[in-house]
Amino acid sequence: MDNKDKRILNKIIEHITSVIDYCAGCENLKDFQNNPMRVEACVFNLMQIGELAKNSLSDDAKNKITAIPWKQIYGMRNRIVHGYSGVDMKIVWDTINDDLPKLREQLINIL
């Protein structure tokens, strides 16, 4: 993996860490939704993660790192960008709680 791809993966990790930090102390979906700035910050970072995964990370890196669900990551970005008012916040919340910590761990191990 080249240095550019490593930088992109590190940037994805930074965005994941930001989301996790923004949600520290958030116990449930209601807590999450009750803070519009938190929601917007998290959704922005999820969009950034998807954009980096789709357009910045090389196809070679994505083909070598098959354990990461690259298409689903970009799919989340598409849902947010093309239908923000219709985005299911439960899916966002579940992604934040269930998927992002695992994804961060996987990326750290890859690097």
Image: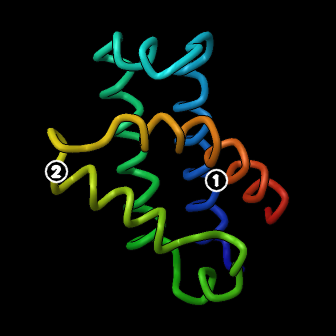
Label disc, if present, on residue 75 of the rendered structure: none
- Estimate the x, y position of residue 53 in percent, counting from the top left: 48, 67
- Estimate the x, y position of residue 58 in percent, counting from the top left: 52, 81
Q: Residues within 10 Å of mark 2 (few under 14, many from 20)?
A: few
Distance (Cα) linking label 2 and label 1: 28 Å
- Estimate the x, y position of residue 63 in percent, counting from the top left: 63, 88
Q: Quadrant of the N terminus?
A: bottom right
Picture residue at 40% right of the left edge, 66% below the top = 74
The secondary element bearing badge 1 is classed as: helix
Task: Left or right? Give the position of 109 relative to 102.
Answer: right
The secondary element bearing badge 2 is classed as: loop
Picture residue at 53% right of the left edge, 39% below the top = 94
Picture residue at 18% right of the left edge, 43% below the top = 86
Label disc, if present, on residue 10 of the rendered structure: 1
Picture residue at 58% right of the left edge, 70% below the top = 69
Label disc, if present, on residue 83 of the rendered structure: 2
In the rendered image of this protein, does residue 105 appear above or below residue 55?
A: above
In the rendered image of this protein, does residue 5 appear above or below residue 11?
A: below
Q: Residues within 10 Å of mark 1 (few under 14, many from 20)?
A: some
Q: Quadrant of the C terminus?
A: bottom right
In the rendered image of this protein, does residue 36 appear above or below residue 54?
A: above
Write down the quadrant of residue 65 in the picture: bottom right
Total marks in image:
2
Task: Left or right? Give the position of 40 relative to 96.
Answer: left
Which sits earlier in the primary sequence, circle 2 or circle 1?
Answer: 1
- Estimate the x, y position of residue 33 in percent, counting from the top left: 35, 19
Q: Nearer the viewer, residue 96 or 16?
A: 96
| Colour treatment of the image | rainbow
Task: Left or right? Give the position of 101 relative to 7.
Answer: right
The disc labelled 1 sits on which kind of residue? Answer: Asn
Write down the quadrant of residue 6 in the picture: bottom right
